Amino acid sequence: MAFTISLGLWGYRQGLIVGAMTLFGFAVGAFVGGRLGPLVLSQGAKSPYAPLCAALGALLAGALAAVAVESVALGLRAKVIRRPALHLADGAGGAALIASVALGLAWVFGSVALHAPGTARLRADVQDSVILRSLNEVLPPSGPVLNALDRVDPAPSVTGPAAPVAKPSQEIATDPDVLAAGGAVVRVLGTACGLGVEGSGWAVEPGLVVTNAHVVAGSDDTTVTTQGGTELDATPVYYAPEDDLALLRVGADLPTLPISDQRDSGADAAVLGYPENGPYSVAAARLGDTTETVSEDSYGNGPVNRTIVALRGSVRSGNSGGPLVDGRGRAVGIVFAATTAGPPGGFAIPAEDVREALAKTSASVSTGACTG
């Protein structure tokens, strides 16, 4: 509220003419800058960093355009606004305009804080805010602007080191069985709390995809995309946040992965998926222990008794829901979290948990509220 009032007072001083022209200049500059920003990247708009460069380009070009237009607007205002009544009306219009912009910025910030990675502390404050809740109801946070802010899954990070095993062998990344397993791996996309969410998944049956519950939480427009670029609508048919596991029904037959519950600590493995909304990736890993632990569910609530598989290897945002496979290309786990200390590592859900979930599917299920 203080932010909105402060900008409203500034808008009153600027006036409607200056405020409107400056915002128009910023919008034009931001549009141009957003298109030019990704051009500095070698992959252009196809780069996973394109949204970031587009946002930086939009801010820089928009700011420069706003400054250029403001000087013209001030001269125009001095010529047009001469009477006290017009000054009052112009100031009131400027205050209303800039205050509305302030509310829009608060709305965007609140939407990002609800769902973007690393904002857990802010999320509770946002959810308790009457103003932001009201804005979210009046202005449902959707569309390409917000989707560009967060196109990566809100993967949890687990405090602690990677599995105490040897460094992964890179040879497994070129193993024929592991490469063949990639045909079953898909990109999972959706929108939750107004922000685009991206993760990974894999087909356990021709028309059934496995992913994490936190990847699809709160989403009602989930799709999966194959390596060939085919996009398929996905219907959640199983959703278990306590296990961070979800199953999606898709309208096409996909290659499948066999499930194995045979895991030996120290054995070679690979993490398959689409990290950071980039291209398909195979990352070498090494299996750690499979242990029972008390932790949180995909919403951060607990305690929850879970069985998890530790691993050493690269786990990045976007890998969530993707398979952890052994040297024969069999799924031995579903990746759900990265470690935060020591060498790269992460944790997976035992792949055999999927068998029990298969017996509990429905025609469709709710994916609850969004999570981060």
Image: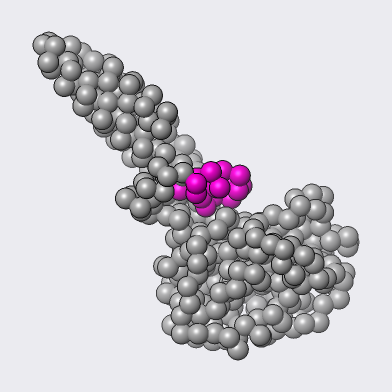
Is residue 53 left or right of 117 when viewed as pictured? left
* Residue 176 can be seen in this image: no
* Residue 20 can be seen in this image: yes
Q: Residue furthest bottom?
A: 359
Q: Residue at x 84, y 67 (%)?
A: 288
Is residue 154 left or right of 112 when viewed as pictured? right
Is residue 313 left or right of 99 when viewed as pictured? right
Residue 180 versus residue 3: which sits nearer the camera? 3
What is the count of numbered marks? Answer: 0
Residue 200 versus residue 100: which sits nearer the camera? 100
Q: Quadrant of the C terminus?
A: bottom right
Residue 282 versus residue 264: which sits nearer the camera? 264
Find out whether residue 125 is within the magenta segment.
yes
Instruction: Please provide percent x and percent y for residue 216.
Output: 52, 66
Instruction: Please provide percent x and percent y for residue 130.
Output: 42, 44
Colouring mode (rainbow / by chain / secondary structure / one colour):
one colour
Please identify the quarter of the rendering in which residue 305 is found.
bottom right
Q: Residue at x 69, y 80 (%)?
A: 353
Please identify the quarter of the rendering in which residue 318 is found.
bottom right
Q: Quadrant of the N terminus?
A: top left
Instruction: Please provide percent x and percent y for residue 7.
Output: 36, 26
Magenta part mainly helix, strand or loop? helix
Instruction: Please provide percent x and percent y for residue 129.
Output: 46, 44
Is residue 314 left or right of 200 when viewed as pictured? right
Q: Residue at x 77, y 82 (%)?
A: 261
Q: Residue at x 30, y 29 (%)?
A: 98
In this rendering, is residue 273 above or below 263?
Answer: above
Find out whether residue 219 is within the magenta segment.
no
Q: Which residues are magenta?
A: 111-128
